[in-house]
Amino acid sequence: MTGAAQYESIIQSLQWDGLRNLWDNIENRNTPGWDAGKAFEYLILRAFQLDGAKVRWPYRVKLFGEEVEQIDGVIYCGGLSCLVESKDFADKTNVDIAPIAKLRNQLLRRPASTIGLVFSRTGFTDPARHLSYFSLPQTILLWTGEEIKYALEKEIICELLTLKYQVCVEDGLPDYDVREKYIL
């Protein structure tokens, strides 16, 4: 079992080409040296870091001496402060409402301007997508595997976050697919 410091060291040694290769390995379920879901979790944060964002790697939050939260990461990008939730299921199961509900509760303990980002390699169920529409004012933006792949190919994940946030502000769409209309 690899620890958090080792994961950070491994992922920070990768540049864009290395992340694209890791993405292919994640999709092929071939990530030796990584515990389940960890390669995906760290890949997301490293992509933002490579694109100029400040990140905080996964950590645990204690409140009154008790662990109350496990945070998959934090991203500071273009004036946005984002809590991250990453889901990479071994099968082709789409993410259900549980991670969105969990993140919504975590956002309730943060400044109102903090937004949530849920990354799913496989996608989301319809109930999960619908819940994201009704989580406002706790903004939670959904990212699919296809969007992540696109961001890695273009090396512009921070710009895509800005676009996704912009569409959510203007049209109220937390699940906007950034591949549809890249307009920045």
Image: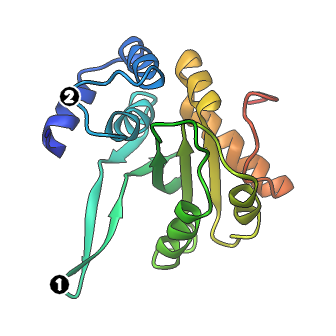
Circle number at residue 65: 1
Q: Determine whether, in the image, residue 166 is placed left or right of residue 145.
A: right
Which residue lies at the image location 46% right of the left edge and 53% below the top edge? 84
| Residue furthest out toward the front | 91
| Residue furthest out toward the right | 171
Q: In the picture, which quadrant includes the C terminus?
A: top right
Mark 1 burial class by Cα count in 10 Å: few <14, some 14-19, many 20+: few
- How many labels were placed on the picture? 2
Residue 62: name its quadrant: bottom left
- Disc 2 marks which amino acid? Gly
Q: In the picture, which quadrant includes the N terminus?
A: top left
**Relative image position of residue 176 (x, y in whole percent):** 76, 43
**In this rendering, is residue 79 above or below 158?**
below
Q: Determine whether, in the image, residue 7 is placed left or right of residue 111.
A: left
Query: In this orientation, does residue 113 appear?
Result: yes
Mark 2 burial class by Cα count in 10 Å: few <14, some 14-19, many 20+: few
Residue 41: name its quadrant: top left
Q: Determine whether, in the image, residue 66 is placed left or right of residue 158.
A: left
**In this rendering, is residue 153 above or below 74?**
above
Which residue lies at the image location 51% right of the left edge and 71% below the top edge? 107
Q: Nearer the viewer, residue 166 or 59?
A: 59
The answer to which of marks 2 and 1 sits earlier in the sequence is: 2
Helix, strand or loop at label 1? It is loop
- Disc 1 marks which amino acid? Gly
Circle number at residue 33: 2
Q: Nearer the viewer, residue 8 or 3?
A: 3
**Relative image position of residue 154 (x, y in whole percent):** 59, 17
C-alpha span from label 2 to label 1: 32 Å
